[in-house]
Image (cartoon, grey):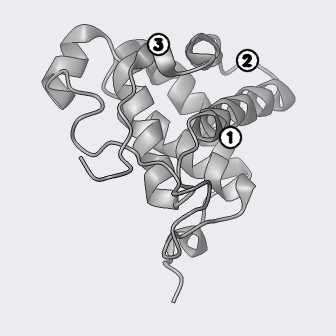
Amino acid sequence: MKAHDISLMLADIAMVGQIEYALLECEEDLSEEEIGVRFWRIGDILLANARIHDLDEDLMNLLCLSRCVACELLCEPMRTRHFHGKCWEFKPPYTRHHGNNDGSSDVRPVETQKVGMVMNLLYFLRYDPVFVPGIKVLRAYHLRHDLWTAADVIWRE
C-alpha cells in the first residue's frame, strides 16, 4: 500500500443499498425524469463516499472507488470469478494529503466525476445478470444525454 492508500470494505460505504435499489428498480418503462433521478443519485452517493473518506479527487482514483463498490455489489460467484474476491486489494483508492488533492491529480468538474463513476460502476456490474436490465436503461440515458464524450477522457496537458 502507498502511504495514503485506504483500506475499506462494504460496511464503510454509505448508502450502498440505495445504489443497489436504484439499479434493480430501473426499468425501461420509467419516465426519462425517473431514470435521470436514479442515474444522478448513484453519482451523488459515490461522490459523497469519496468525500466521506477524504479521497483524492483525481479522476482515476474516483474510478477506483466505483470499481471497488461495484465489486462489492456483485454476487459472490461473480466477485470471486472477476476479482478473486478481493475488491479493495488490486488498486485501492488513496486519500488526500493533509486535506488537499495531490498537485498532479486530474480533478474534473463535479458532474464529470459523477458521470465517470456511474459509468465505471455500471461497466463492472455487467458481470452480474441481476443488474443488466438496469444497466441497459442507465447506459441508454447516458447516451441520450451525451453525458460522457471523448473530450471527457482526454488527459489534461
Disc 1 to disc 2: CB gap under 8 Å: no
Observer-side mark, 1 or 3, equals: 3
In three-dimensional space, the C-alpha distance between marks 1 and 3, rounded to whole angstroms, equals 30 Å
- Report which quarter residue 30 is drawn in: top right
What residue would you read off at disc 3? 11
> From the viewer's perspective, is residue 50 above or below residue 131?
below
Distance from Cα at disc 2 to Cα at disc 3: 32 Å
Under tag 3, what secondary structure?
Answer: helix
* Residue type at numbered disc 1: Tyr
Q: Percent x, y for residue 133? A: 51, 20
Tell me the kind of residue under disc 2: Asp
Q: Residue at x 42, y 48 (%)?
A: 94
Would you say residue 10 is visible in this rendering? yes
The first of marks 1 and 3 along the sequence is 3
**70 left or right of 156?**
left
Q: Nearer the viewer, residue 88 or 155?
A: 88
Point out the frontmost of discs 2 and 3.
3
Tell me if I can see residue 147 in this picture. Answer: no
Q: Please, what is the three-letter code of the amino acid marked with disc 3?
A: Ala
- Mark 2, residue position: 29
Q: CA gap, disc 1 to disc 2?
A: 13 Å
Q: Which mark is residue 141?
A: 1
Residues packed near mark 3 inside 10 Å, few (<14), some (14 to 19) or many (20 plus)? few
Give x and y (percent) for residue 53. Answer: 56, 36
Numbered label attached to residue 72: none
